[in-house]
Amino acid sequence: QVKKEVGDVTILINNAGILIGKKFCDLTDEDFEKTLRINFFSQVWTLKAFLPAMVDCNRGHLISTASAAGLMGLYRLSDYCASKSAVIGMMEAINSELYHGGKRGIKTTIICPYFLSTRLSKGFKSKRPCLYPVYDPEYAASRIVDAIKKEKFYLIMPPAVYLLGLKIFLPRKAVLFLESYVKFPESMEEAYGQK
């Protein structure tokens, strides 16, 4: 319908997501499937619909909202982390295919925020807001627009999220200590434990 009414799309912003917030053993198969369908497959389908026209003219910009949770497995987020990790991997692979296929006129941007104060994260409060603030949507949107204009490959926010990238260099106990220090499990329990 979009192709019919508007024509070829040259900028695609994928931003779909649900967050159930259950522990792994409490998630039903349906929960997992729903999370992957909305958080990951919806992006697959829109990319399949609009990327071919971008490839034909070697022009466009693909923006996918993933999450800081896509960079590391976190407490009460096994399905969510899996879906957002899949988005990151897919976008990196598409970028590689475009680059090596000579389609360098198509840009890619992967958005990896921590929590935003939206309905998705209703009730979540950071225990260490100086490190991991919960941003308001207007601020996040302005950062995202800026990243798109500057054609950044990644937008990771807040800067402390970069610490998650150190996971491959650190013993697992150090990573778990960091989670404990920022009291992430407690924040998740308060936000999702009673639901």
Image: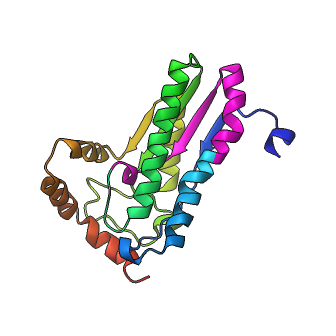
Q: In which quadrant of the rendered image does the C terminus lie?
A: bottom left
Q: Percent from the top left, x then y, of residue 109? A: 50, 35
Q: Nearer the viewer, residue 139 or 107?
A: 107
Locate residue 98 relative to residue 169 in the image: left or right: right
Q: How is the image coloured?
A: rainbow
Spot occupied by residue 176 in the image (x, y as percentages of width and height)? 18, 59
Give the vertical position of 183 relative to 72 (above or below): below
**The stretch drawn in magenta includes residue 96:** no
In the image, residue 29 above or below residue 69: below
Q: Nearer the viewer, residue 164 or 138?
A: 164
Q: Which region of the structure is painted magenta?
A: 45-71
- In the rendered image, the vertical position of residue 191 relative to residue 15, given as above or below: below
Residue 150 visible in the picture: no
Query: Which residue is painted at 55% across and 24% down in the image?
Result: 98
Residue 47 is one of the magenta-drawn residues = yes
Which residue in the rendered view is the most extreme toward the bottom? 194
| Along the line of sight, the residue nearer the viewer: 41 or 163 | 41
Residue 181: name its quadrant: bottom left
In the image, 107: left or right of 3? left
Residue 157 quadrant: top left
Q: Please, which residue is most extreme toward the top here?
A: 102
Instruction: Using the rendered image of the protein, determine whether residue 86 is visible from the camera's viewpoint.
Output: yes
Q: Which residue is most to the front? A: 29
Residue plotted at (40% across, 76% down): 192
